[in-house]
Image (tube, helix red, strand yellow):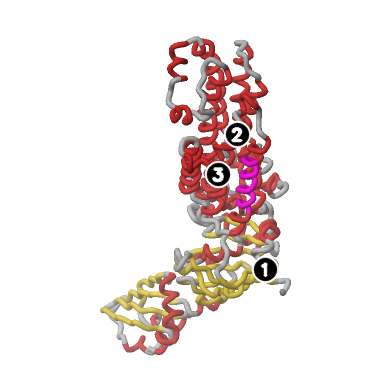
Amino acid sequence: MNNDVVINTTKITKYYGTQLGIEDVNLVVKCGEVFGYLGPNGAGKTTTIRILLDFIRPTGGSAAVFGLDARQSSVAIHRRVGYLNGELELYNDLTGEELLKYLGNLRGGLDWKYVQELAARFQCELPRRVQGLSMGNKQKLGLLQAFMHKPELLILDEPTNGLDPLMQHEFYDLLTETKKEGRTIFLSSHILPEVEKVCDRVGIIRQGKLITVETIESLKSHSVRKLEIHFAAPVPKEKFINIPGVRDIIVRDNLLTCTVVGSLDALVKTAARFEVVNIISHEPSLEDIFMTYYNGGKNNAE
Amino acid sequence: MLNNIFLKTLRDQRRSLLMWGAYLIVLGVIMALFYPTISKMTAFNQYLSQLPEGMKEMFGTGIIDYTTPSGYFSTELFSLMVPLLLLVFGIGFGANTIAGEEEKGTLGFLLTNPVPRWRVVADKFSVLVVSIFVLGFLFWAGLAVTASAMSINISILKLAEATIGACALALVFAAVAFLAGCVKGSKGTSMGVASGLAVLTYLLNTLGGLVNWLKDYRFLSPFYHYMEPDTLNNGLSPVHLLVLLGLVIIFFAFSIPAFIRRDIAR
């Protein structure tokens, strides 16, 4: 086992009865990287994470974290991992402070100063009971308990759930700092822009199967975008037809709509020959991305 | 109270323990307070002594005699009321502490920490045992203090022994609920299995006293091992007590691998 590999799964498969959770998932996450695990709800993200943490056992294959077997060494692994559950359930009758201190005790002690620092950053009101907290405030406590013991690996399942934009921003900053310290982050999300923003590499999972793993640059390079260009006057369609990566072109008077794969450069340069009033770019949805992988070559050939 | 899982679990129980404790103290006190009055109701006692055998068997010892303290306390308290109350508490707790927490989703959260699963099971089971004996102690204290104050002629040591027997019986079914929770993770199922088993084995023991062919199977019922020694008169029977405690240990021992082996629901 290579020392700089933090997570390594070999063909992990999980069936719930006859229902497929995930199938033959091979993941390698390296030390110090921010790995995004992207997929729609129910794709198998949480299943994968729960196998890594030994909450559930794979039907087939095996998983290793820090080179330790996820099943045999779960306690040793948990000691070095901070985990945020996607379906966060905290002890309702405790205050934030009691909750974090209890967890700290289970971990054999805490740097309480650091906890307070984090709490201040995320504007957590620690003396309040969990019961009365809003979803966002619970999520902040969830983040705190994941980060508070400065773990080597953070496994975060939908971490920005319920956070307002300001707190999301704070969270992204914290991720950046964590990465700078050489720690590893594995985060699952169904929001593409979020993953693009913070991750080095992305694994895309759909219906239990890992479709692809690639760097953000390469993901962007063949990301699909829907574009609307408004011109001052009607434009001739022929001028746009042979631009590489541009397809589904519809021209109606002053308006051109099309789909662009990868770089916008050629299209924008062509459009610049006419008077452009407005360009509207729609962020590609997850489904669009999946479609590129599924139909891959086919669409490009058209 | 938040140093470890044992103390945290005990803390979660504090309101429930306070309430149950208060009820049980009151029960012991009231039953002792009423003894002098009831023991003097001769007409009532004559009526009781003439009840058919089957009816008497339902009350446990086959003898109903309210004119002696031990007869009164064994029928009124130890044949059904006290074990039943402890049983209800124990089954509820046994089903809730693993399966209930799992259904709420906080068990998964707890297991995120560097704590082995066996430790979770052992700590929670220890709290179950401690809670039942604390409740038993509170009941006994209320009863013994009142009985002494009223100079009722009964050994408070025998009362303690009978209470220990009732605790052991309740623990058997609490351990069943606990084990079922470790196996399945469903609170409802755990409570159902344990209560159902309690009712069936209770019937086996009572009917076994009446129906000849059932007699040979009475030893299968924990209630038999609780009732048979007539602890209030004879003191605890080590053999019968060991059977009950043995069952508790066996159920606990199976709980650990059952919980370690399976997937945690949430």
Q: Position of residue B215 (x, y in %)?
A: 51, 40
Q: Nearer the viewer, residue A132 or B144?
A: B144
- Mark 1 lies on residue: A6
Q: Residue at 47% of width from left, 31% of height from top?
A: B58
Magenta-span inclusion, residue B249: yes
Q: Secondary structure at mark 2?
A: helix
Residue type pointed to by label 2: Cys
Same chain letter for marks 2 and 1: no
Q: Nearer the viewer, residue A210 or A55?
A: A55
Q: Dots 2 and 3: beta carbons under 8 Å?
A: no
Q: Secondary structure at mark 1?
A: strand
| Residue A140 visible in image | no
| B12 horizontally vs B199: left or right | right
Q: State whether residue A102 is above or below residue B40.
A: below
Separation of residues labelled 2 and 1 (CA atoms): 50 Å
- Mark 3 lies on residue: B220
Magenta-span inclusion, residue A65: no
The quarter of the image holding the N terminus of chain B is top right
Same chain letter for marks 2 and 3: yes
Q: Position of residue A142 (x, y in %)?
A: 57, 51
First in residue order: circle 2 vs circle 3? 2
Residue type pointed to by label 1: Val
Q: Position of residue A126 (x, y in %)?
A: 59, 41
Separation of residues labelled 2 and 3 (CA atoms): 18 Å
The overriding secondary structure of the stretch rendered in magenta is: helix
Q: Over which residues does the magenta segment extend?
A: B243-256
Q: Nearer the viewer, residue B176 or A199?
A: B176
Q: Chain of mark 2?
A: B
Q: Secondary structure at mark 3?
A: helix
